[in-house]
Image: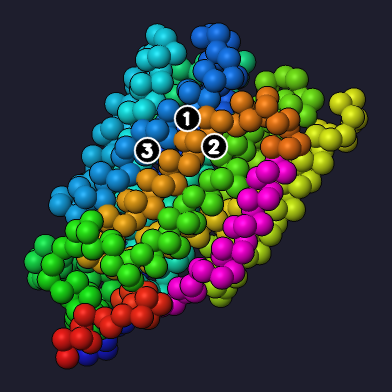
Amino acid sequence: MTSRKEELRAQEPSHGRRNVIVTAIIAALGGLLFGYDTGIIASALLFIRHDFHLGDFGQGAVVSAVTLGAVIGAPIAGTLADRFGRRRMILAASIIFIVGSGACAAAPSAEILVAARVVLGIAVGIASAVCPIYIAEVAPVDVRGQLVTLFQLAVTVGILVAYLVGLVFNSSEGWREMLGLGALPAIALGAGMIYMPRSPRWLVMIGERSEARATLREMRGADQSAVDEELGEIEATLQAEQGTYRDLLAPAMRAALTVGVGLAILQQITGINTVIYYAPTIVQFAGVSSSGSAILASIGVGIVNVGATLLAIRLLKNTGRRTLLLVGVGGMVLSLVSLGIAFLLPKDSSVIGPMAVISLMLYIGSFAISLGAIFWLLNAEIYPLRVRAKAAGIGTMSNWTFNFIVSLTFLPLIALAGRSATFFIYAGIGVLTWLFCLFLVPETKGVPLEEIEAEWDRRAGVTPPAAAGG
């Protein structure tokens, strides 16, 4: 009898770990929707621009409409996630995803398509702000990095699925089917989140201590002392109050926001979504004329994106976030320079196409192991609990704002400056990004969320409230 009890007790931690992993996977479906609904436009645009007779600016408007919606959705997500909970906001996002996908598929004009994609973008903004926070708050510290990175992996899978769907409907030019299929993973996300627990850290924030303990026990296993210790750490940092936007002006928060918002902006202005949204178009620039071949080359880029993100998850076990940022951003700079050089070659050169595709693959792989995976991880873990959702919402809003700017201006920038100069500009910004990571980004690998908060206090030269109170 005793041995049976001991066996069951030994199994409980692994049971808790399985619960955490299942919860993270369900929440990461928000990332898959993020990836699909942003990536599918790359293939659909090849046919939308002909059906609606769109010029460069019109194409940019259709592409960037989702990012404009995300700029709206991300900041409101922070406030509403504190009020109603992370889980409810993810459920709300799934409903908006379904409505937006249907409206895009049925759009009779470019103007209505843009409006529908703005609605879809609101869901993308909510999911990108709340899903990583939710995963970070249910995950134990030793696997937090890998589980939050599941969100970015899901984004890359969503992009790859979007390219594959684009290839399937290429012959029929079925852009409406491409856009409408986004409703399917949204239904799965909503159905799955109904059964997921509420964030234990959010439960403490609203005073539901007993439910928070029960959730932590379910997620951590049988070690009640460890559960109580983690619960105590959460309570100590929260101080039984919700933060306000005014709290973001505190010196420690300014230090954290400098890193979070800085990475949010730099992730975009190094040009990533020119590749995600316009990959087939860039390949056609390199001399590949058929839409099918261009989409097929984009699938290769998508496969590299998924593979490199899987590699990032493995590397995060033993390698610091900051180290991966430096290595990956360096690779991005080199591949952008290579892409710029490719477009300097004579137009009839047979080297342009292969060189452009290889450069795109190296670029997306370097991005995936660095800014792709690590921005969303840091944005979910570097802020204090009492203002985490609000601060992460600002970081996400900044990310989507510059995503909107870059995606709207890419084709006009190429028309103005030329293809080579455009990619050289992004490479120069990449150098600045590398220096930013070197001098300002802290290492958070293996560091409890509560200790990360103390690091910002130290950087700002202030005494943490708990210490000040004795």
Q: Name the residue: 39% across, 68% down.
A: 255
* Dot 2 and dot 1 residues touching (CB under 8 Å): no
Vertical arrangement, residue 382 with respect to residue 273, above or below: below
**Residue 431 located left or right of residue 349:** left
Vertical arrangement, residue 202 with respect to residue 67, above or below: below
- Identify the residue under disc 3: 70
Q: Magenta span covers which residues? A: 423-449
Q: Main SS of the magenta segment?
A: helix
> Which residue is at the front of the view, 129 or 433?
433
* Dot 3 and dot 2 residues touching (CB under 8 Å): no
Q: CA distance from mark 1 to mark 3?
A: 10 Å
Mark 3 surroundings: few (<14), some (14-19) or many (≥20) residues within 10 A = many
> Which residue is at the front of the view, 49 or 415?
415
Mark on residue 406? 2
**Amino acid tagged 2:** Val
Q: Earlier in the sequence, mark 1 or mark 3?
A: 1
- Identify the residue under disc 1: 64
**Amino acid tagged 3:** Ala
Vertical arrangement, residue 109 with respect to residue 72, above or below: above
**Amino acid tagged 1:** Ser
Q: CA distance from mark 3 to mark 2?
A: 14 Å
Q: Name the residue: 17% across, 91% down.
A: 470
Mark 1 surroundings: few (<14), some (14-19) or many (≥20) residues within 10 A = many
